[in-house]
């Protein structure tokens, strides 16, 4: 009877030990799964969730890309085709019904939905306002505290859109280069140096570089003035790794 009881005790002890070991393993997996789940949740609300949908050959998309690189903002790039059989996918039309690139799905403060910014100028505005989180803040500019700088970079942005782009397009399409060269001569005196608005990169540089770089490749900024301020600025940007990353061997005009 004693031996039988001992065997039963050993069997019970062994079963209990196996059960305890199994529960420990299960707990380990559960905790690991929970930890992974928490990490995934944390990652989804982290700056790494910035999503940049673009086409690398588009100059409008390039200026937003430059802003992301200059500000060292973490992002995931998704490049899409814009034309042909492999054109814009259905999910992109849902993201931006206008069908234009770039689109930045920007991470926001915890507890708020990510912001969909579907225009290159609006993306630059978001950097100026400090609304795109996760970066170094170099492009942030307070209109009240840095009024002169704010107005200067806004002047450049407006000039690129309203004068450089239409006049540059006309010159490329054969309407003559005189008007373009006159414009570039005027812009030359507005460069503060080494960047357009001074010592630091601003959204003015992000906005201007894709278009003036293309004009230089087509016509040559050095033809305005051999030691052009614009040309010096262009070389400064080309030497900046943030700008370098966005320069493509094949590229489009802006029309």
Image: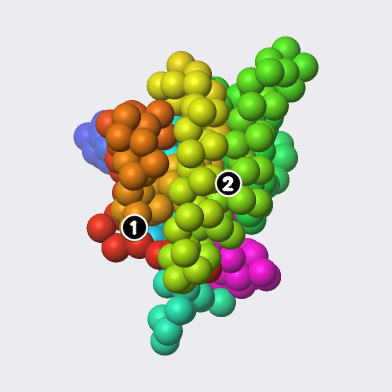
Q: Secondary structure at mark 2?
A: helix
Residue 229 picture location, percent across and down: 40, 29
State how many labels appear: 2
Which of the two labelled residues, at mark 1 and mark 2, occupies the earlier sequence position? 2
Q: Is residue 86 above or below residue 205?
A: below
Residue sitting nearer the eye, 40 or 70: 70
Q: Can I make out residue 110 in this image?
A: no
Q: Secondary structure at mark 1?
A: helix
Left or right: 38 with respect to 130? left
Q: Is residue 82 magenta?
A: no
In percent of the image, x 40 and y 53: which residue is there?
215
Residue 205 position, x and y percent, is 49, 35
Taking depth in this image into account, of 102 and 181 the one nearest to the observer is 181
At which x and y percent is residue 222? 32, 41
Mark 2 Cα within 10 Å, few/some/many (few <14, many 20+)?
Answer: many
Q: Quadrant of residue 4?
A: top left
For label 2, the residue is 160
Pick whichever, 53 or 120, lies toward us.
120
> Colour scheme used in the picture?
rainbow
Q: Position of residue 63 (x, y in %)?
A: 49, 46
Q: Which residue is mark 1?
A: 218
Write the residue at 54% across / 45% down: 183
Find the magenta span and give its range. Answer: 91-103
Membership of 93 in magenta stretch: yes
Outermost residue toward the right in this view:
144
Q: CA distance from mark 1 to mark 2?
A: 17 Å
Judged left or right of residue 203, residue 248 is left
């Amino acid at each position: 009877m004693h031996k039988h009881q001992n065997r039963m005790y050993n069997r019970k002890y062994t079963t209990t030990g196996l059960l305890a070991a199994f529960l420990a393993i299960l707990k380990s997996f559960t905790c690991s799964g929970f930890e992974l789940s928490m990490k995934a949740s944390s990652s989804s609300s982290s700056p790494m969730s910035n999503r940049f949908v673009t086409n690398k050959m588009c100059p409008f998309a390039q200026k937003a890309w430059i802003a992301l690189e200059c500000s060292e903002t973490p992002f995931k790039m998704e490049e899409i085709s814009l034309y042909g059989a492999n054109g814009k996918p259905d999910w992109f039309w849902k993201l931006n019904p206008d069908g234009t690139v770039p689109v930045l799905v920007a991470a926001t403060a915890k507890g708020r939905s990510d912001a969909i910014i579907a225009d290159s100028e609006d993306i630059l505005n978001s950097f100026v306002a400090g609304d795109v989180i996760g970066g170094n803040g170099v492009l942030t500019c307070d209109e009240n505290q840095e009024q002169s700088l704010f107005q200067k970079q806004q002047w450049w942005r407006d000039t690129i859109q309203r004068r450089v782009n239409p006049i540059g397009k006309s010159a490329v399409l054969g309407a003559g280069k005189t008007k373009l060269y006159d414009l570039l001569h005027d812009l030359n005196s507005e460069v503060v140096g080494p960047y357009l608005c001074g010592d630091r990169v601003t959204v003015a540089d992000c906005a201007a570089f894709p278009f003036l770089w293309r004009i230089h490749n087509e016509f040559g900024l050095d033809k305005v003035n051999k030691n052009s301020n614009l040309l010096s600025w262009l070389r400064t940007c080309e030497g900046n790794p943030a700008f370098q990353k966005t320069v493509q061997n094949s590229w489009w005009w802006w029309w």
